Image (tube, rainbow, N blue to C red):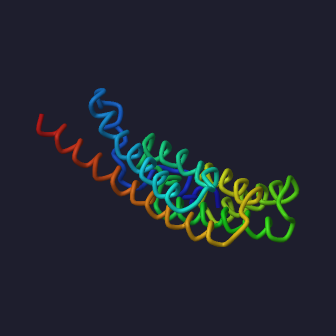
Amino acid sequence: MGSERSSLKPLKGANRSLRQRLNWRGELALALMPTLVILSVLGFVEALTQQRLLFASLASSAFLIYLDPQHGTNSVRTLILSHMMAATTGWVLFLFLNGGYASAGIALVVTIVLMILLDVVHPPAVSTALSFALRANNETNLILFALALSVTATLVLLERVTLWILAAHDRSS
């Protein structure tokens, strides 16, 4: 079973050697999109809610996507499923256990087990579970998180396009 786990491996056909050849301008180009996406998500969240900490894990996701956009742990499928599963788990446990360490601890364990069983391992999702289990007092936060997550998921595609452009530029040089 362990050899089929896609979320723990580079994506099939990924050209990971390009990253090693990037100069500082290439690295900055690759880092630009995660930075802009997370700043726009923060602006979006600020305009709609005061629950800023519920979205902190998305910044970690953005950095992982920048670090290795061609790894299975950063695929759109893994990103969305792990975060939404974690947010829902945390939110449900908040509702039933009124927040606190019990809801956070159970959300942490359930999220980790589900990520492994469903092959959607994305470490920042554990923070999402904790955030929602500790402070997710209404379903609006869950819906808003889903919208912010969809914006972050577009980052995966943007990073892959950026890598493709950098690789094309590298070949032409």
Residue closest to the eye, 135 or 114: 135
Residue drawn where x is 11% and y is 39% of the image: 172
Occupied quadrant, residue 21: top left
Most foreground residue, 42 or 111: 42
Residue drawn 88% across the image and 57% down it: 102
Where residue 41 sits in the image (x, y, percent)? 46, 54
Residue at (53%, 64%) from the top-left corner? 80
The residue under the point 28% across, 27% down is 23
Q: Quadrant of the C terminus?
A: top left
Residue 171 in the image, given as x and y percentages of width and height: 16, 39
The number of callouts visible is 0
Give the side of residue 114 with respect to residue 50, left or right: right
Compared across the picture, whether 83 is left or right of 172 comes to: right
Horizontal side of residue 118 vs 48, given as left or right: right
Which of the two residues, 97 or 18, is positioned nearer the viewer here? 97
Q: Quadrant of the N terminus?
A: bottom right
Residue sitting at the far top: 24
Image x and y of residue 137, in percent? 73, 66
**Residue 25 placed where, x, y %?**
27, 30
